[in-house]
Image: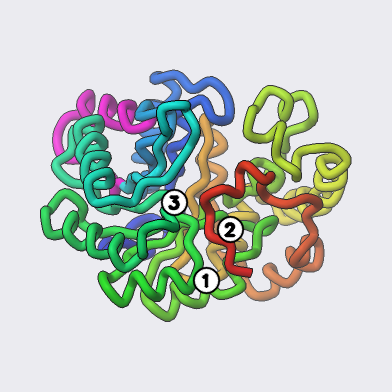
Amino acid sequence: MIRRKIAGAEVGAVGYGAMSFSDFYGPASEESSFAILDSCLDLGVDHIDTSNVYGMGRSEERIGAWLKRRGGACPFHIATKGGITRDAAGNRRFDNSRAHLTEELEKSLRRMGLEAVDLYYVHRRDPEVPIEDVAETLAALEKSGKAKATGYSEIAPSSLRRAHAVNPVAAVQSEYSLSTRQPELGLLQACAELGVALVAFSPVGRGLLTDRPHGPEAVAKIDFLKGNPRFLEPNLSANLALTERFRALAADWGRPAASLAIGWLLAQGDHVIPIPGTRSPAHLREAAEAKPLTPEEVAAVEAILPVGWAHGDRYNAAQWVGPERFC
């Protein structure tokens, strides 16, 4: 696998999004999570991206249990996040205070059995806290030695520039794929200009850009998808029909569709690092096999799935609470 730079380190160009260690997209056992981490080690997938809220700590706990069972030094470049919490009524809210981010990082370290994480993101911005203040908090966490580098998830290019002026930002995580092209409207460019890694989550469009996309029955069993505009009818049928030509192109080229989708992302810049999430070692292997597409291949893919092809927004109103909109 080709290598790319993130947070002062060099990692495999394809990482792994460990939300799949929770039950977000379906049941995930400790055994299946361990099998994925074993496969990551075998495939050279060494950037593992998790969060304190994935399964309310379960994702981090499983990473910690795997590391404890293996023994020795951690073989992965590990990123986690803090900043999302819930109030007494159970409603989601955002807390970017120094006390909260520090406490949550310490909890994450205990769950994973680590002295420091390689990268600590602010998961969502609290609009009540100036991002300059948040950047100062992250600088303090780096100085403490508990986070080797820091970054943000789902922020606008303008916020990135403000934060970077106070404390260097190592990475920004954002949804980016052939079906979600918003980062190209300033975030992709700002990251390249500032030397910031763009960590692309949901790189296969939550399954739409694979050989086995979710149909109506599967969608009905996944809470997030059954309320997501792109997976509601008539949008779901339209999106499945539109991506069928993409799957056919991948088959003609002798590649898994997921590998082709991630190869397209890898061609968008040397600073782009996709982090597919899956509970299947076989699917992980398909993702890890991706290579950057040539300009000719990019053109062929985009002729089938041009900018704006997807039917429906990427989030519903409730899901949009938190990510910064900038266009």
Residue 10 placement: quadrant: bottom left
Q: Is residue 62 magenta?
A: yes
Task: Tell me: 268 left or right of 122.
Answer: right
* Label 2 element class: loop
* Mark 1 residue element: helix
Dot placed on the residue nearer the N-terminal end, 2 or 3 = 3
Judged left or right of residue 129, residue 242 is right
Identified at 56% across, 54% down, the residue is 175
Q: In whole angstroms, how far apart are the C-alphas of marks 2 and 3?
A: 17 Å
Q: Marks 2 and 3: which is nearer the front? A: 3
* Secondary structure of the residue carrying numbered label 3: loop
Q: Is residue 41 magenta?
A: no
- The spot of residue 209 in percent (x, y) is 69, 48
Q: Are marks 1 and 2 in contact (CB under 8 Å)?
A: yes
Q: Mark 1 is on which residue type?
A: Leu
Report the residue marked by disc 2: 176
Which residue: 36% across, 64% down?
A: 130
Q: Quadrant of the N terminus?
A: bottom left
Tell me the kind of residue under disc 3: Arg
Relative to the observer, which residue lies in front, 252 or 303?
303
Specify start and end residues of the magenta stretch as a single range. Answer: 59-78
Residue occupying the point 53% across, 20% down: 27
Q: Nearer the viewer, residue 130 or 21?
A: 130
Q: Residues within 10 Å of mark 2 (few under 14, many from 20)?
A: many
Q: How many marks?
A: 3
Going by the numbered disc 2, the residue's amino acid type is: Tyr
Query: Which residue is pictured at 62% across the width and 42% down the height?
Result: 318
For mark 3, what is the residue? Answer: 124
Q: Which mark is residue 188?
A: 1
